[in-house]
Image (cartoon, rainbow, N blue to C red):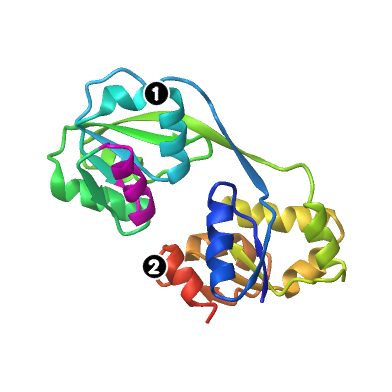
Amino acid sequence: MRIWVARPEPGAARTAERLAALGHRPLVAPVLVVRPTGTPPPPGPFAALLLTSANALAALLATGADEALRGLPVFAVGPHTAALAAKARLGPVETGAGDAAALATLVGRRLAPGARLLHVAGAARKPEPAASLEAAGYAVATHLAYAAEAVPHLPDRVAAALGGGDPGLDTALHYSRRSAAIALRLAEAAGRGGAFRALRHYCLSDDVAAPLEAAGIAVHFVAARPREDDLLAGLS
C-alpha cells in the first residue's frame, strides 16, 4: 500500500522505515512541525518526572535541563518514550500502557498523593494525566518544552497524489487527534477533501479517530492499544 505518514519528525522517518520493511510504500509528509521552546523547567524539588511523548523528552534533552533531573523516577507514556528515557540515563523508568490516563493510574499505584510531579509536555497538551493526578491529590507542575505548529498548506506531494498523480495514495496513518484534524482541514482547503475522505484511515486510538468520524469519514482501523505495533498490525 501507498501510505501517507502525516506525523511529525523524527517519528515520521522511523515509521516510514517500519512500513518499508513490511513491504509498503510510505509517503512522509508531516502536517505538524515540532519546535522546542528552549525554556527551562520550573524549579524543584520533584518526586518524579512525567513524559507523555518522545518529543517532550527530546526537547528537554536539547536544553540540558535533564542533568538536574537525573535520579528522579520517570513515568513514560509508552515503551518507545521509556526506551529513550533509559537511553538518556534518566530514571529508573516505569512504562505506561500507551495513553496519558493510564499513565496517571500507574503513578497512583507507585507514589503517595501529595507528591510534586513535573510533567514535560507540548503546548497543545491534553488535560490528562494532570487532571486525574491533581484530582487525586498530587501537585503537577507542567513544563511546556515544545510546540507543534501546523504546516501552512497540504504538502505538495500529498496534494499531487490525492489529485490523481502517480503514485497515488491508498491509506493514511493518524497518530494524534490534532494531526488528523489538521490533515483533514488542509486537504479540504486544497480541494482534495473528497480524495482524502476516500482513503483508508488507520488511527492510533479512538481519540485520534474522533475528528475524522465527526466529519463523517469512515475510519478503517483503530488500534486496540495506543501503540505503533498495534496500529501497524492492522495493515496486514
Residue kind at label 2, given as amino acid type: Arg
| 185 falls in the magenta region | no
Residue extent of the magenta highlight: 76-90
Q: Which numbered mark, 2 or 1, is in the foreground of this view?
A: 1
Residue farthest to the front, as pictured: 21
Q: Are marks 2 and 1 in contact (CB under 8 Å)?
A: no
* Residue sitting at x 75%, y 67%: 196
Tell me where residue 90 appears, x and y as whole percent. Answer: 27, 36
Q: Nearer the viewer, residue 71 or 96?
A: 71
Q: Amino acid at mark 1?
A: Gly
Mark number, residue 64: 1
Residue at mark 2:
225
Q: Indicate whether 196 appears above or below 134.
A: below
- The answer to whether residue 90 is above or below residue 80 is above
163 vs 20, nearest the viewer: 20
Is residue 126 visible from the viewing direction of this image? no
Q: Residue at x 42, y 30 (%)?
A: 60
Q: Upstream in the sequence, badge 2 or badge 1?
A: 1
Where the N terminus falls, by quadrant? bottom right
Image vertical order of residue 233 relative to residue 136, above or below: below
